[in-house]
Image (cartoon, rainbow, N blue to C red):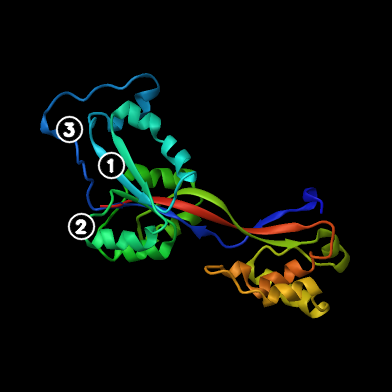
């Protein structure tokens, strides 16, 4: 199969968010507003962190579902920040994050920040009253660097709480450009178009043996609608071809502070 003839279309995004809880732990070090000393002036590569100067010795906790080795790069991303400001970011990744975060929040041991992988969990956390709204600077960055559609995923009942962190590909639906051209099919650009074309292809020809076998296989737990049987009818046409294209859904992670 020629990879050069494959193409990618965005379907439905799945989101992860970073949220801030009601209060930072500041478990070590004093408050810079206590008059302990003047705020230092950061220079050189550290100058961009001047807004965070004066908090050396403070600790901020972050909880997420991202574990090693993926979390290794995540922690390296704030190494310069910590070196320049003296603020320690204590990160914890867990496969039990989604069940443990509500327990910690209601139990009074919430992290300062949480990277939430789905809007539903963010809504659940907002209902506890422990999620802090982002600062004006965070909102400005969201509006400047991200498409406005992403902001919806971090918004609950009209209030913005969680900024996007990253995006990645989620799942694929393969199709054959050659077969599409021969049959006069147009590449769908909306979910409705995909469903309509899927039904049209399914009616035009019986599924191949390989496709029929895939119908009998159980759907993986947590599989999204993009992996449904109707979507797969597009991929059936590609199972017997030598070149294909792919339809993907993207995933975004978003950040929002946790009190």
User: What secondary structure is found at the residue carrying circle 2?
Assistant: loop
Residue at the image point whose x is 33% and y is 47% from the top = 62
Residue lying farthest to the top in this orientation: 44
Query: Quick check: 167 above or below 14?
Result: above
**Which badge, 3 or 2, comes first in the chain's sequence?**
3
* Numbered-mark total: 3
In depth, the one of 112 and 95 nearer the eye is 95
Q: Can you tell which mark lies on residue 108?
A: 2
**Which badge, 1 or 3, comes first in the chain's sequence?**
3
Between the residue at mark 1 and the residue at mark 3, the CA separation in whole angstroms equals: 15 Å
Mark 2: give few (<14), some (14-19) or many (20+) Cα within 10 Å: few
In depth, the one of 46 and 134 nearer the eye is 46
Q: Position of residue 126 (x, y in %)?
A: 30, 62
Residue at the image point whose x is 39% and y is 35% from the top = 78
| Residue under label 3 | 32
Query: Quick check: 19 above or below 184?
Result: above
User: What secondary structure is found at the residue carrying circle 1?
Assistant: strand
User: What secondary structure is found at the residue carrying circle 3?
Assistant: helix
Residue lying farthest to the right in this orientation: 182
| Residue under label 1 | 60
Q: Position of residue 184 (x, y in %)?
A: 84, 67
Query: Quick check: 197 above or below 44?
Result: below
Left or right: residue 213 versus residue 227 is: right
Residue at the image point whose x is 67% and y is 57% from the top = 9
Quarter of the image where the N terminus is located = bottom right
Left or right: residue 110 versus residue 13 is: left
Task: Using the rendered image of the protein, determine whether residue 53 is visible from the camera's viewpoint.
Answer: yes
**Which badge, 1 or 2, comes first in the chain's sequence?**
1
Between the residue at mark 1 and the residue at mark 2, the CA separation in whole angstroms equals: 16 Å
Residue at the image point whose x is 44% and y is 48% from the top = 67
């Amino acid at each position: 199969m020629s990879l050069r003839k494959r193409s990618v279309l965005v379907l439905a995004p799945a989101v992860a968010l970073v949220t801030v809880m009601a209060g930072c732990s500041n478990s070590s070090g004093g408050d810079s507003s206590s008059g302990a000393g003047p705020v230092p002036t950061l220079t050189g590569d550290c100058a961009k962190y001047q807004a965070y100067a004066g908090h050396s010795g403070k600790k901020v906790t972050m909880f997420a579902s991202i574990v090693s080795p993926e979390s290794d790069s995540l922690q390296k991303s704030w190494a310069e920040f910590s070196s320049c400001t003296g603020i320690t970011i204590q990160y914890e990744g867990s496969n039990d994050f989604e069940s443990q975060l509500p327990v910690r929040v209601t139990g009074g041991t919430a992290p300062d920040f949480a990277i939430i992988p789905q809007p539903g969990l963010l809504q659940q956390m907002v209902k506890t009253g422990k999620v802090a709204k982002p600062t004006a600077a965070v909102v400005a960055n969201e509006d400047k660097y991200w498409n406005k559609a992403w902001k919806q995923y971090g918004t609950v009942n009209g209030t913005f709480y969680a900024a996007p962190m990253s995006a990645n590909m989620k799942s694929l639906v393969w199709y054959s450009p050659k077969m599409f051209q021969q049959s006069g099919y147009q590449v769908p650009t909306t979910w409705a178009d995909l469903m309509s074309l899927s039904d049209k292809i399914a009616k035009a020809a019986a599924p191949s043996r390989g496709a029929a076998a895939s119908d009998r296989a159980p759907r993986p737990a947590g599989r999204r609608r993009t992996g449904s049987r109707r979507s797969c009818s597009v991929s059936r046409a590609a199972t017997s071809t030598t070149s294909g294209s792919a339809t993907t859904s993207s995933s975004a992670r978003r950040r929002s502070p946790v009190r």
